[in-house]
Image (cartoon, grey):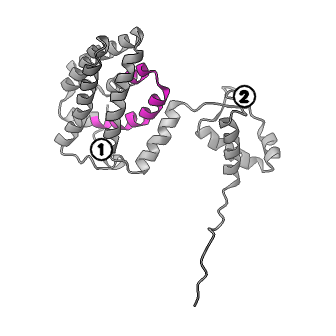
Amino acid sequence: MKTTKNFFEPVVTEPAYRAVARMIESKILAGEVKIGEPLPSEAALADQFGVHRSTVREAIRSLEQAGLVARRRGQKRLYTTKPGSAQISRRVSTAMLLGKVTFHELWEVMLYLEVAAVNAALDRLTDDILTKIEENVIESELAVSEGRSTVLLDVEFHFLLAQAAGNRALLLCREPISQLFYPAFQSVMARLNAGERMITAHRKIFEALRNRDRAMASEWMERHIVDFRRGYELADLDLDTPIHDAMFELPEVR
């Protein structure tokens, strides 16, 4: 029996609410609807799109989750908004978890990003940020001496460096990776009592920034991130384990 070759793919239709959300989103991204500008009411949007209000309501819910629209406190009116870094980070982190990204992949990207951040920071460093970095190092030293967790302080240290770099693209790129990377690796490092090594690296990086010593800053940042990998290996954990699987094996970060 002769078979007929298929030249075309089946037509796939998307739900009406997704089409509505996509059209509103395209207007916002194109700048035709400005950030902070109010949207028409649900009834008006339903009339314009020729759909039921329930369809518009579902589309709005989708846009709210994406951080593109929001209601101001005490108001029912919807306004266009710019997604915050936390919302962007959450979506990217979810994609990494579902995509079974491994710790090795995460570590490799962090190595590139953190070295780039410390180099960019040297070009744009302000006295205010330098003071905050020093305060972070001092607080971290105190936490280690008192046996307290340094996870949040470590996250803050690297965030301050990225902030000092003055590059919004860098901040947005590293945020979701940082949220997955540092708490997990710090859990491993805590098993090995490696707080002193972390503090030494942070102190050396701070001194390099203060002295505007690019070579020293890059060297110690690279050594610092390599230490994370070494700690993972010393704990006999597999770097090729997907983040999602390993997160349930690591001790809770407190």
Which kind of residue does numbered mark 2 sit on? Glu
Across and down, in percent, residue 40 comes to: 78, 35
Picture coordinates of residue 178, whole percent (x, y): 38, 33
The chief SS type of the magenta part is helix
In the image, 73 versus 14, the foreground residue is 14
**Circle 1: residue type:** His
In the rendered image, is residue 156 in sight?
Answer: no
Q: Quadrant of residue 131?
A: top left
The disc placed on residue 222 is: none
Region rendered in magenta: 160-185
Residue placed under numbered mark 1 in the picture: 104
Indicate the secondary structure of the residue bearing disc 2.
Answer: loop
| Label 1 secondary element | helix
CA separation, marks 2 and 1?
43 Å
Return the residue at label 2: 37
Residue at (48% x, 30% y) in the render: 169
Task: Name the outermost residue toward the bottom.
Answer: 1
From what the image shows, is residue 128 above or below residue 95? Answer: above
Q: Is residue 238 above or below residue 32?
A: below
Nearer to the camera, 111 or 12: 111
- Front position among marks 2 and 1: 1
Q: Residue 111, how many percent across, how many down? A: 31, 34
Identify the residue at horizontal 34%, vertical 15% (top origin): 133
Q: Is residue 166 left or right of residue 216?
A: right
